[in-house]
Image (cartoon, helix red, strand yellow):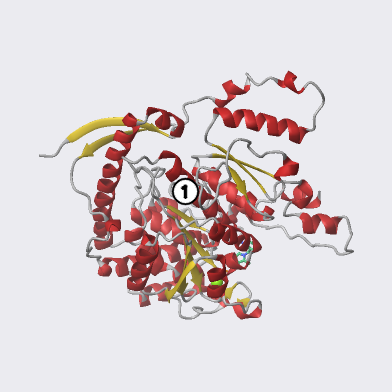
Amino acid sequence: MEDVVQNSVEFHGKFVHLELVDSPTKRLRSGEEFAYDFNALREAAIISKGLVCDQIFHAQSGHLGAALGCSAIGAALFGYLLRFNPMEPRWLNRDRFVLSCGHASAFLYAWLHLAGYDLTLNDLKNFRKAHSRTPGHPEFGVSDGVECTTGPLGQGIANAVGLAISGKKSEAMFNTDGQKIFDYNIICLCGDGCLQEGVASEACSLAGHLNLDNLILIYDRNNITIDGGLSRSQSENVEKRFDAYGFEVEIIDGGSIEQIIASYSKLASLKNGKPKLLITDTVIGDGIGEVAGTSKAHGEAGIKFIKSAKEKLGLPDIDFFVSESVRRFFDGRLSERLEEYESWYRIFDAWSRNNPNLHRILLKNGDICEKLEKFECEKFGKKVSTRTANGEVMQFLAGHDPLMVTGSADLFSSTKNYLDGYSDFSADDRSGRNVEFGVREHAMGAIVNGTCYDGIFIPRAQHFWCFSITCGRRFASCRWPGFTHFISLHTTPLRLGKMAQPTNRLKLCLR
Ligand SMILES: Cc1ncc(C[n+]2csc(CCOP(=O)(O)OP(=O)(O)O)c2C)c(N)n1
Ligand SMILES: [Mg+2]
C-alpha cells in the first residue's frame, strides 16, 4: 500500500503542494547498476539538433555551432545525469546547470523543453524575439531552468564557482547527522572562449584552492572561435593548466554519449576535494556538413543548409518535430525524477520538523530590515568614512542574519567589511563567512553574482572602484597610456537579449 501524505510548504516565497508517495526511488547516484536507454538518448540528441536548427532558422539568427556540437552532452545531462525537477525548478537540492557559453542558448532551450520544463514549442518558435522566454542569451528569471544570465564569455564559469561556494556552505550549515538535505553539484558547460577569458582563470584558480569538488566544468573543446581556429591565439596545454589549479581532469570524445555518462558519473562521485574538468572533444556545427568543424559553423552561416541537414539527420520535414518515442522517454524520466524529489522531500520534511531554527533561517523568515532599525548610528559619535560605517552596519547585520557572507580581493583591511568573530571560508572550514578572494577582483564580482543567483546566502563583496574590471578602459580614457579603446555597441541588442544592451556600460567604461 502506498503511503500518501498531503503537504504544502513555502519554498522561496512560493507555495508548493505535494503528494508524497512512499515508493522506492531509482537512485542513479547510489552506484546501483542502472540500465541507461542509449537508443533513446541518441534519438533525443538528433531531435535536439532539429529543435536547435528550427529555432535559429525561424529567427534567421543565432548560434548553431556549439548548440549542435554539444547534442550528445545535452542528451546525457538532461536525459540522466543532472538531478532536477521541472515541476519545481528551484528545488533546493537540484543540480545547478550553467551554460557559460550563453550564445549557445538554443541548446539550452531545446533541452529544457524536452526535459519537461515550462518552455513550450511556441516559446522555441519565439526564439530571439522581444519579451519572449527564449531571449538570444539565457536570462535568469525569464525561463525556468536558467540558473544564471550568461553571454559574456567566462562569466558563467565564475558564477558556477559562486554556486559551488553556496553549495558547500549549505551542506555545512544545514545538513545534520540525521538528515542530509544538500548534496547538489554545479555543472557548467563552457567553450574555448570562456576558458580564454581571464575571469575563468581567476575563478578556477580559487575553486581549486577552496577544494570545490561539487563543481564540474564540461569543456566543449571544438578548437574554433568566431574568427577561426583556436591555434591562432592559444597554444597552452589546458589539461596541465587545470591540473595545476588542482582540478581532476579527463578528456573524452564529446560525441559519445557512453563516454560522457561513464566519465561524468566517475567524476561526480569522486569527492576528493578536487573540482572537475571534463574536456569533451566535439565538432562545431556537427550535423551541417557544409560548415561543420569550421568557424563558419559558429553563428548563422549554416542556416541555408538547414533543410538538407535535417534530412540527412533523418528528421522529417516538420518544423519543431519531437518524436513520440522521445516524448515517452522523457515522460518516463520525469516520473523517476518526481520520485527522487519526493524521497528528498520526505527527508526535508523530517529535517524541518527536527530543526525548526535551521528551517526558519533557510526559508528566511527573519526580517533583516526590521533589525536594521535597531542599529544605533549615534554610537559612532564622530564622523566616519562611509566604508567604516558600512563595515559597522554589516557587522551588526551579520549578527542577526547567519546567511550573510562577505568577501574582499585582498583588501579587507581597507574595505573594512571583514566580519569579526567569524572565520574565513576555506577548504577546511565551510562555516566561514569571510571569503578571501585573493587579488581577483574580476572573478570576485562574478562569483558573488553566482552565490546571489543561488538565493540561499546573502553575499557581499567590496573593492575599490579604481581596481574594477574597467580599469584598462578607464586608464585609456584618461589617456595615460596614450591609447584609445574603440568600443563597439551591438546594433541588435533586441535579438541578442539583455546581455548585449549598452545601458550603463558605456557610462561605466568611460568613468
Ligand atoms: C566577454 C565576451 N567577449 C566576446 C564575446 C563575443 N563572442 C561570442 S561567442 C565568441 C567566440 C566563442 O568561441 P567559443 O567559446 O569557442 O564558442 P564556439 O565558437 O565554439 O561556439 C565571441 C568572441 C562574448 N560573448 N563575450
Ligand atoms: Mg569553440
Secondary element at image label 1: helix
Where in the figure is residue 265, as x and y percent of width and height? 35, 64
Q: From the viewer's side, name the closer residue of 491 and 381.
A: 381
Where in the figure is residue 222, as x and y percent of width and height? 51, 75
Q: With 357 as the anchor, is 203 left or right in this view? A: right
Q: Residue at x 61, y 63 (%)?
A: 201
Asked where in the image residue 237 lies, by quadrant, the reply is: bottom right
Q: Residue at x 80, y 29 (%)?
A: 384
Q: Amino acid at mark 1?
A: Lys
Asked where in the image residue 114 lies, by quadrant, the reply is: bottom left
* 433 up-or-down from 243: above or below: above
Q: Residue at x 80, y 33 (%)?
A: 385
Where in the figure is residue 269, as x and y percent of width and height? 36, 61
Q: From the viewer's side, name the closer residue of 20 and 229.
A: 20
* 490 up-or-down from 53: above or below: above
Where in the figure is residue 128, as x and y percent of width and height? 53, 55
Quarter of the image with the N terminus in it = top left
Disc 1 Cβ-to-ligand 1 distance below 8 Å: no
Asked where in the image residue 180 lies, by quadrant, the reply is: top left
* 117 up-or-down from 55: above or below: above
* 448 up-or-down from 480: above or below: above
The quadrant of the rendered image in which ligand 2 is seen is: bottom right
- Residue 138 visible here: yes
Q: Which residue is mark 1?
A: 168
Q: From the viewer's side, name the closer residue of 119 and 456.
A: 456
